Structures are given as C-alpha cells and as structure tokens.
Amino acid sequence: MKNFVRICKVADLPEKKGVRFEINDEDLAVFKVDNEIFVISNVCPHNRVALIYQGYLCNESVTCPIHGWKFDLRSGNTLSNQSNIRKYETKIIDGEIFANLPRKFLNW
C-alpha cells in the first residue's frame, strides 16, 4: 500500500535549490526544478552524509557537495558510480507536495 505523507506547499520551495525535511524518520532532500518536484534521500550512499539538499544542481541532477557523486533527480540513479540514491514517488494535490514514504512498523 502506498503511504503518501504531506511534505510542504509547492509555493514554499525555492526554484533550483534543495530543502531538507525530516519526516517519519526519513531524511529527505526536496528540489523544485523548472516547477517540477523531486524528492530523494538526503543521505549520500558514499559516506552516509546528509547533505544532498546542499548539492550542486545541473538540469535534472544533483551532485553531492562532499565527494562529488552525481545523481539523476528523476530516477535516483547514479551518474558517476554504481550506488543509487533512494527516489520517492510524489504527488501534487491542491498545491501541496506528498511523498510515498515507507511505513514504519514497531517490533516490540
């Protein structure tokens, strides 16, 4: 089942600049590029650094500001090595951004 969770309003995002959100234990990097929304993991798979939102944008890709790993915002696929970054399915409803985040289950 899909678990879409509200992130923010589209109007609250700056164009071509990342914003960090922490929702339901997920560290997210959200980008608006030419009015298109992309939600990916904020944690680079290289050294687990949570700074993707501060990465360098070029068209529809982001480069990690720490070690230069480059990721496609549409797919999460790497453009520079073998490790991909998690990409979240998104929906825009009435100007609000929703992302499909994994459900958390407690195993007590």
Image (cartoon, grey):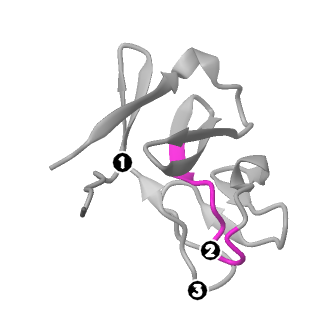
> Which residue extends farthest left?
1
User: In the rendered image of this protein, does residue 26 appear above or below residue 13?
Assistant: below
Left or right: 38 as drawn, with respect to 64: left
Kind of residue sitting beneath label 1? Leu
Q: Mark 2 or mark 1: which comes first in sequence?
A: 2
Task: Identify which amino acid the numbered label 2 is placed on.
Answer: Pro
The answer to whether residue 71 is above or below residue 37 is below
**Precedes in sequence: disc 3 or disc 1:** 3
Place of residue 103 in the rendered image (x, y in percent of width and height, measured from the top left): 28, 51
Q: Is 40 within the magenta?
A: yes
Residue extending furthest right? 66
- The residue at 49%/50% (across/down) is 26
Picture quarter containing residue 16? top right
Question: Mark 2 or mark 3: which comes first in sequence?
Answer: 2
Left or right, 39 with respect to 98, comes to: right
Residue 81 picture location, percent across and down: 65, 84
Residue at (76, 63) in percent of width and height: 64
Which is in the foreground here, disc 2 or disc 3? 2
Q: Position of residue 73 (x, y in %)?
A: 57, 55
Residue at 25 percent of width and 42 percent of height: 3
The residue beneath circle 3 is: 82
22 relative to 52, above or below? above
Element under label 3?
Answer: loop
Q: Which residues are magenta?
A: 38-48
**Marks 3 and 1 close (CB-CB < 8 Å):** no
> Rounded to the nearest whole Å, what is the CA distance between mark 2 and mark 1?
18 Å
Q: Which residue is mark 2?
A: 45
Sort mark 2 into few (<14), some (14-19) or many (20+) by Cα contacts within 10 Å: some
As displayed, is residue 71 above or below residue 25?
below
Q: Which residue is mark 1?
A: 101
Give the main secondary structure of the magenta stretch: loop
